Image: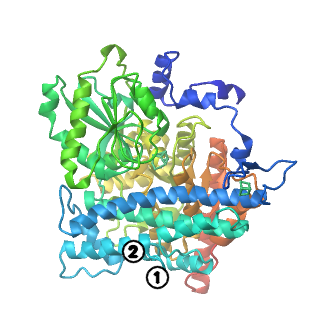
Amino acid sequence: MAEKKKDRNRTVDPAALEVLAKTEGNGVESCFDRYLNMQPQCNYGNTGICCTICIQGPCRITKKASKGICGATGYTIVARNLVRHVLGGTSAHSDHGLHTTLVLKEIADGHEGDYGITDSAKLKAVAERMDIATEGRSDKEVLKDLVDLALQEFSRIDGQESLWIEKTVVPERLEKFKDCNIMPYSVHRTIAESMAQTHMGMDADPVNLVFQALKAALCDYLGMHIATDLSDILFGTPTPVVSEANMGVLEEKMVNIALHGHNPVLSEMVVKAARSMTDEAKAAGAEGIKCMGICCTGNEVLMRQGVPVLTNFSSQELAIMTGAVDAMVVDIQCIMPGIQAVSECYHTKIITTMPSVKIPSSHYVDFDEAHAMEKAQDIVRIAIAAYKERKPEKVSIPQFKNKVVAGFSLEAISDLLSAINPDTPIKVITDAIDSGELAGVALFAGCNNLKVIHDDSHSTIAKELAKNNVLLVATGCAAGTFAKFGLMNGDAVEQYAGDGLKAFMNRLNEANKDKMTEKLPLIFHMGSCVDNTRCYDLVTELAKQWNVDTPKVPFVASAPEAMSEKAVSIGSWCVTLGMPVHVGVVPPIPGSPLVDGIALQIAQDVYGGYFMWEEDPQEAAKKLMAALNERTWKMKVHKMAQEKYETDTISATW
Ligand code: BF8
Ligand code: SF4
């Protein structure tokens, strides 16, 4: 391990390795260099027992000092830091959701501009789920009510608890949240009360703080569910698409535009603009314009437009170091400030677009939705101009890419399943689990984190689970890894799936052979990080079919390279909603054995979900399999008891 910490090549992505090798010693610095410069990292921070909440600090818990200057103990400090991490994630996701809501509000108010309702069936479905009347009403009338409700979900002060949560979870979960007093009124109220609760000299009770963290995490779920629902209405619900992934998607003779960040409101428009501006690119000497994605903006435009994936989080700077990216257009979140300094060593233009994300020396285009297409064209023109400044001697495109079959919204999956069982599509999965053909379902989510080897754990664990017949779904940068590594196409099923999973996929392929031009992939790409709610909606569907609460469903989640505060908030709501969650990078919690114990064990007693910290990918795969096996075994016992005693649901929530 000590050796590895000195090695700059902390990745198993062949494209990233090639860029690192070719740029070794040329003075251009990426996160792979900065990670090494940062070693050793502080162990107080690593374990969560450093407090900077007031400026008497930093206070660290040591053998000599068992309390902060104010008297806060380790458990208070760790729990308070945890709440604030969750709040960072919740704010990010819900601000994204609010942005989408405000774009739809303009449409509802009659100021469409360049946007419109793309998926009126989804509008109807979401409205009906939220008890909004649709019969005999125009799309705009329905949208107006839906937008009003969404705005209340962000800003309500009291009176009514969140409806978006209530309507998307099984009743037993709702009861649990009410019992534990963690049902929020709204996102903004919860963020404000949690910030107040974690101010210096406020809550010192770690259990109370952890409950507040979970309440805030439910607001993360709420904000991102709104983001996904409304993005589908605005841009369309994803259906299967075929594309490619990894740096080999860069084209030497094209204007290459990298779309990076999270918000499809901007990137959808840039893709549209780029498709209509080929002539301008040709006039500049290029063969055309190619858009490609990084991080979750990449996932959004892959899912809906088939835009290829350039790379994921940790290798974002390396993409620029190929010398072939003409512009990197960024919106919000997970954008390393380091991209600007790297771009200055090449011809690449970094274009920031949001008032909340500015990077010194970058180009700033104030992307206002009222002039969306015009602004998108301005952005594409900057890229075309940059193409003319390319330095051919610096261009070196790693020739690695793989075919990707993506676009698996829950609606798309349901559509595939309905080819086998048109009345109850979800039964195709529950039957396969009941019969033992499938061992359960696993969600791979989350980021890259250089504390572990880039992309390694994702692919190792996924292959292991596939071998053991687990149905796999993925989002975020985990999905980025699988796309780059050729695990999101039909060939991977042949190569890695166990017999049960193979039989299941073959049955689906056979039933859908008239509809699909490509074989189904080993891992279903369900979208960006906000789309983790699509995955939870799948859990809810499974639970309803089995007539059980969600903690009984053989479904696990894994974030092998969790990095961001958003990953902390997602992991926390997954646990609260009843999932076993593996995290491959230990978050700053073990500094308090009490809070650690809550995360690893006590959470299970209360919510049925729990965390597992495990850095070793083989061990992680074993733990995930054990969690699934425990649940499938219990499901069998449960079913037998149901039949023998002719009872309905058994109330235990374990
Ligand atoms: O929201 S997986 S590194 S890009 S935080 Fe960021 Fe993590 Fe990637 Fe997407 Ni999610
Ligand atoms: Fe130190 Fe207490 Fe201030 Fe934290 S809140 S920095 S523990 S004095």
Outermost residue toward the bottom?
Answer: 646
Closer to us: 397 or 358: 358
Circle 2 packing at 10 Å, graded few (<14), some (14-19), many (20+), is: some
Task: Indicate yes or no: mark 1 CB to ligand 1 under 8 Å.
Answer: no
Q: Residue at x 23, y 53 (%)?
A: 514
What type is the residue that disc 2 sits on?
A: Gln
Q: Which residue is mark 1?
A: 160
Circle 1 — which element?
A: loop
Labelled disc at residue 147? none
Q: Earlier in the sequence, mark 2 or mark 1?
A: 2
Disc number placed over residue 152 in the picture, else none: 2
Q: Residue at x 71, y 65 (%)?
A: 201
Above or below for 291 versus 127: above
Of all residues, the one furthest to the top in this rendering is 393
Q: Is the CB atom of the residue marked by disc 2 within 8 angstroms of ligand 1's nearest atom? A: no
Q: Position of residue 517 (x, y in %)?
A: 26, 46
Please tell me which residue is depicted at 51% across the width and 49% down the height of the picture.
446
305 relative position to 495: left or right: left
- Per the model, the C-alpha gap separating discs 2 and 1 is 10 Å
Question: Where residue 409 sits: x, y (%)?
Answer: 36, 58
Q: Is residue 526 shown above or below 458?
A: below
Secondary structure beneath label 2:
helix
Q: Are marks 2 and 1 in contact (CB under 8 Å)?
A: yes
> In the figure, is residue 612 to the left or right of 185?
right
- Identify which amino acid the numbered label 1 is placed on: Gln
Observer able to see residue 417: no
Q: Quadrant of the C terminus?
A: bottom right
